[in-house]
């Protein structure tokens, strides 16, 4: 059937995620892979201390297994899967060091950045030489016009990829937030991939299905968190899909929440340093600011998801 390459990978990935949840979550509990909650954060978060993290393993396995089933017929999903798993493994290592080996810092900043640069470099090489994907970028609302950045193309790619990955990471801070937002983004990529015959729909569908399954365990009150394992993997997925379809200029629109989350951290830290201890927001990333303003956690998740859904619809018009 014509639509089977859309529905089936969603169902496979969703089913795997649902099945793996009751198997992996108790294992994480036995390993005492618990989340440490910031004491200076919202008081409502203190009860989350000890909730199993590293649940992104569910997402990675579900997406990987589903994608492998389609990789033969859809080879363009391979670089997306590589970047998704590559960044996910960096997050897994970071989580492992923090919560299993009890190294509060996890990976040092330079170690994490070096690994991210290596993964991005391999992806870029594969994209350019093996897949032959053009790195010109479609301009939103420009009726098919593209932007060619010339010598700045590769540096810009590195900035976009690593920025997107870390923006997604900062968004992971409330029950179901980054899962809900990224479901909207992956649905946008699915519609765009089908409309442009990009050949990557199976993996965008797989991510959608995996996140729907994961949300059963991650929705408030969450019984598991995805950790850096999941958030970095999702960031890799979002950035790689954008480049496979020549849509990185659409990321500020569909990934608006990722952008404002990371900007809120940059603004907060920068202003704190130059002002001698003053703050712009009550707390960063931005979702915590709204919590401290009196919003319930579920309201923040709902509003951020609705904003993303509306901007994804706008982005479809901009194609």
Image (cartoon, rainbow, N blue to C red):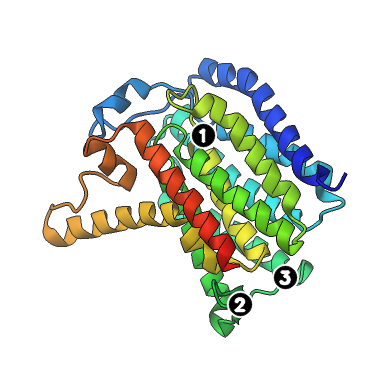
Q: Secondary structure at mark 3?
A: loop
Measured as percent of width and height from the top left, residue 306 is found at 45, 45
Q: Secondary structure at mark 2?
A: loop
For marks 1 and 3, the one nearer the N-term is: 3
Left or right: where 50 falls relative to 8: left
Which residue does the numbered mark 3 point to in the structure image? 133
**Contact between labelled residues 3 and 1, with CB atoms less than 8 Å apart:** no
Left or right: where 278 falls relative to 251: left
Residue 226, which numbered label? 1
Q: CA distance from mark 1 to mark 3?
A: 31 Å
Measured as percent of width and height from the top left, residue 283 is found at 24, 44
Disc 1 versus disc 2: nearer the observer: 2
In terms of depth relative to the viewer, which is nearer, 17 or 236? Answer: 17
Disc 3 versus disc 2: nearer the observer: 2
Left or right: where 72 falls relative to 56: right
For marks 1 and 2, the one nearer the N-term is: 2
The answer to whether 69 is drawn above or below residue 113 in the figure is above
Residue 143, which numbered label? 2
């Amino acid at each position: 059937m014509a639509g089977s390459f859309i529905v089936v990978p969603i169902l496979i990935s969703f089913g795997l995620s649902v099945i793996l949840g009751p198997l992996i979550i108790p294992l994480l509990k036995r390993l005492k892979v618990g989340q440490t909650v910031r004491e200076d954060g919202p008081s409502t978060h203190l009860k989350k201390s000890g909730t199993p993290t590293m649940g992104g393993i569910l997402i990675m396995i579900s997406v990987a297994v589903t994608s492998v089933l389609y990789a033969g017929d859809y080879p363009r999903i391979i670089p997306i899967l590589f970047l998704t798993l590559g960044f996910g493994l960096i997050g897994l290592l970071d989580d492992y060091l923090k919560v299993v080996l009890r190294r509060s810092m996890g990976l040092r900043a330079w170690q994490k950045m070096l690994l991210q640069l290596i993964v991005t470099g391999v992806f870029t090489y594969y994209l350019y030489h093996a897949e032959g994907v053009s790195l010109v970028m479609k301009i939103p609302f420009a009726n098919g016009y593209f932007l060619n950045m010339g010598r700045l193309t590769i540096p810009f790619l590195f900035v976009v990829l690593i920025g997107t990955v870390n923006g997604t990471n900062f968004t992971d801070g409330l029950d179901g937030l980054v899962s809900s937002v990224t479901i909207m983004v992956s649905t946008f990529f699915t519609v765009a991939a089908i409309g442009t015959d990009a050949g990557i729909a199976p993996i965008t569908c797989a991510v959608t299905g995996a996140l729907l399954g994961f949300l059963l365990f991650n929705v408030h009150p969450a019984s598991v968190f995805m950790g850096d394992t999941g958030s970095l993997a999702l960031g890799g997925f979002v950035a790689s899909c954008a480049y496979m379809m020549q849509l990185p200029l659409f990321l500020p629109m569909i990934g608006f929440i990722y952008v404002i989350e990371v900007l809120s951290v940059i603004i907060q830290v920068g202003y704190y340093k130059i002002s001698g201890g003053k703050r712009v927001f009550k707390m960063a990333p931005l979702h915590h600011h709204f919590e401290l303003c009196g919003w319930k956690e579920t309201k923040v998740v709902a509003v951020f998801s609705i904003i993303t859904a509306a901007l994804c619809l706008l982005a479809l018009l901009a194609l």
